[in-house]
Image (cartoon, helix red, strand yellow):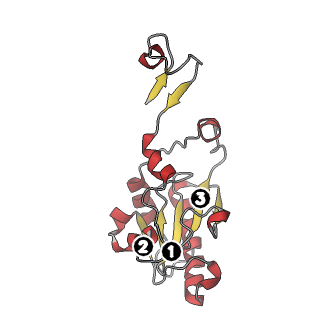
């Protein structure tokens, strides 16, 4: 909801604000992310780790795009761009060096499939791909490894995230999940 500061604004009249010609975009739903609600409290798979819980859900409810033998692809609940997904091992492991050879290979293959699906479904022109290993490196959920795949387009960075600290996403997550699941390469198909 946009709220402009005008002479007739009840907030201003109550002394809670001063006119400054800015409009506000209120996003109270983001407070759950800011406060870390739903974030696992411990470091083990039985401590409520969302990346351990998601595979127990059906694909639509869990926003799962594809499942493999060792890893799965899932949409990020707090995306940087539409189509921002993650590739996660099923096994609760925090460090890339601790993946076994099969997990490493399938994580790489799923990352390639994610690039293919995002190009097919949305015409992505570039990508940010990577992992934040450890809390000090920026991992929001450091206890369970996950690789981010963020699609990029020319001009996709605008004033909203820079000035407004707000991301504008043109599509609902459920619709994005359906679109990417349909575009995901079939088993054996070369990405």
**Badge 1 is on which residue?**
43
26 over 139 or under it: above or below:
above
Mark 2 or mark 3, which has the lower sequence index?
2
Snapshot quadrant of residue 157? top right
Residues at circles 3 and 1 in contact by the CB criterion of under 8 Å:
no
Mark 2 or 3, closer to the camera: 2
The residue lying furthest to the top in this view is: 7
Mark 3 or 1, closer to the camera: 1
**Badge 3 is on which residue?**
150
Residues at circles 2 and 3 in contact by the CB criterion of under 8 Å:
no
Residues at circles 1 and 2 in contact by the CB criterion of under 8 Å:
yes
| Secondary-structure class at tag 3 | strand
**Badge 2 is on which residue?**
47
102 over 116 or under it: above or below:
below
Compute the Cα span from label 2 to label 3. 28 Å
**Residue at x-position 46% and y-position 75%:** 186
Residue 174, position as x, y percentages in the image: 38, 55
Residue 163, position as x, y percentages in the image: 64, 35
**Residue at x-position 58% and y-position 88%:** 100
């Amino acid at each position: 909801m946009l709220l402009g500061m005008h002479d007739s604004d009840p907030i201003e009249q109550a002394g809670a604000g001063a006119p400054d010609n800015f409009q506000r975009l209120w996003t109270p739903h983001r407070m759950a992310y800011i406060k870390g609600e739903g974030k696992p409290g411990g470091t083990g798979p039985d401590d409520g780790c969302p990346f351990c819980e998601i595979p127990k859900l059906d694909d639509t409810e869990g926003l799962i795009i594809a499942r493999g033998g060792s890893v799965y692809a899932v949409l990020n609940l707090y995306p940087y761009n539409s189509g921002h997904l993650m590739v996660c091992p099923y096994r609760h492991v925090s460090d890339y060096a601790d993946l076994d050879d099969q997990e490493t290979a399938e994580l790489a293959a799923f990352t390639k499939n994610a690039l293919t699906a995002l190009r097919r479904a949305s015409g992505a022109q570039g990508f940010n791909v990577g992992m934040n290993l450890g809390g000090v490196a920026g991992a929001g959920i450091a206890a369970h490894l996950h690789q981010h795949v963020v699609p990029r387009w020319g001009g996709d960075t605008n004033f909203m995230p820079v000035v407004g600290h707000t991301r504008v996403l043109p599509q609902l997550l459920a619709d994005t999940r359906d679109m990417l699941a349909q575009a995901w390469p079939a088993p054996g198909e070369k990405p």
